Amino acid sequence: MTPLLTINLLRVLFVTFCAVIGANISSALIGNLWPGLVLGLVLGLVVVLIDRLLKGVSLRLFSSATFGLLLGLIFANLLMASQVLRYQSETMQWSVRLIVYAVFGYLGMMLAMRSSRDEFSLIIPYVRFARETTQHEPLVVDTNVIIDGRIADLCAAGFLSRSLIVPRFILDELQLLADSREPTKRERGRRGLEILNQLQGSREVELTVHDSTSEDVDLGADARLVRIAKVLKARLLTNDYALSQVARLQRVAVLNLSDLTRALRPTVVAGDEIDLHLVKEGRESHQAVGYLPDATMIVVNHARAHVGKTRTVVVASALQTTAGRLIFAEFKTAPRKRRFRANRFEALSQVHFALRHCRSCEESAKAARHRPTAFAA
């Protein structure tokens, strides 16, 4: 039985209990159970409606409001004990007393709910509440983060919160992917479920499956994630850039692993020496290509003969493209023969281009010389 079904069952039992109690009282007082039955039903439904309206109120907020109400009533009682209205009539004293208690009670609740934990130490000096640091705030995880798999290593290393919240619809989405007929989707879904099982078995992580309410069914997956994070006052962990922007617009704290990857990307400038493994040939006839650990491509000139080997290269320049950074490098100590051949090839290319240019100029002059001139009649 899901928690939502349990809550609805308790509400039905409470309304039924109120109706039965009202019927018994009415039958004992006036001999007719129907007025009491109707009154009990109305009272039970009103209480359930108040419960629905207080859905977003947490136990911490309710405790703060209760504490503020008690303080307000104490101050109101001290004020009324001064007998400032002793010469007034009983009606006036009752009216003023009611207004003073209501105003001080309201102000006490509002001040308490707006106050932080540390501010309570001014009233209770010897009590210190444990500070809830950002690192221990719960994290609501997205599907792509679970499938990515790096979350397990980050939690094991202590860089993320120990409390992870997986919404029920995210778990259903992973199960749907795992049962898909397409091999790619099936592999992604099974990988996500394996990561969740690994996190659940870890001692450093507290994994919780959150059951959302029926009101969120009509919303999209991204909207439901943002809503759950707002209700639980948790941070959202995702790889989706659009979801991150939407959540930040709604004042929800977001941790994007892509932003973390970009922040941890090593900075490579001209002149840096890198031990690079050349994995394939480049676009030009003399180029070879290697990759940094963050998948940044490095193109090494005059290195095609060294494909499959690890060589020390020197960064020459870097170019930012739409697909990412593209870095050009040269050998730290290039072989002389290879450098001579490259220089000779470049010189021959320049001579060939000059000869073609001169030949085209001669042909243009010859054509202009033999072109018939038009005379006026």
Image (spheres, rainbow, N blue to C red):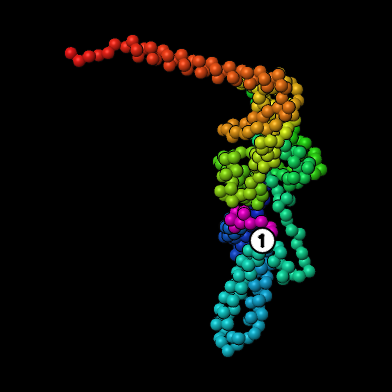
Q: Quadrant of residue 65?
A: bottom right
Question: Residue 297 or 348: which is nearer the viewer?
Answer: 348
Give how far across and how far down residue 109 sits, in percent. Answer: 63, 67
Is 251 displayed left or right of 146 in the figure?
left
Residue 188 visible to the viewer: no
Q: Viewer-proximal residue, 197 or 147?
A: 147
| Pointer 1 local density, CA inside 10 Å: few below 14, some 14–19, many at least 20 | some
Vertical position of residue 235 compared to residue 118: above or below = above
Residue farthest toward the right in the current orientation of the protein: 203
Which residue is identified by label 1? 62
Q: Nearer the viewer, residue 248 or 188?
A: 248
Q: Position of residue 4 (x, y in %)?
A: 65, 46
Q: How many marks?
A: 1
Which quadrant of the figure contains the C terminus?
top left
Taking the magenta stretch, the answer to whether it contains residue 105 is no
Residue 56 belongs to the span the image colors magenta: yes
On the image, the x and y values in percent for residue 304 come to 68, 20
Q: Residue at x 38, y 15 (%)?
A: 365
Amino acid type at mark 1: Phe
Which residues make up the magenta segment?
Answer: 50-60
- In the structure shown, which secondary structural element does the residue marked by tag 1 occupy? helix
Residue 75 visible in the shown view: yes
Farthest bottom residue in view:
87
Residue at horizontal 65 percent and vertical 73 percent from the top: 73
Image quadrant assignment for residue 268: top right
Residue sitting at x 39%, y 15%: 364
Where is residue 354? Give x, y as percent. 51, 18
Q: Is residue 99 left or right of residue 197?
A: left
Left or right position of 64 against 36: right
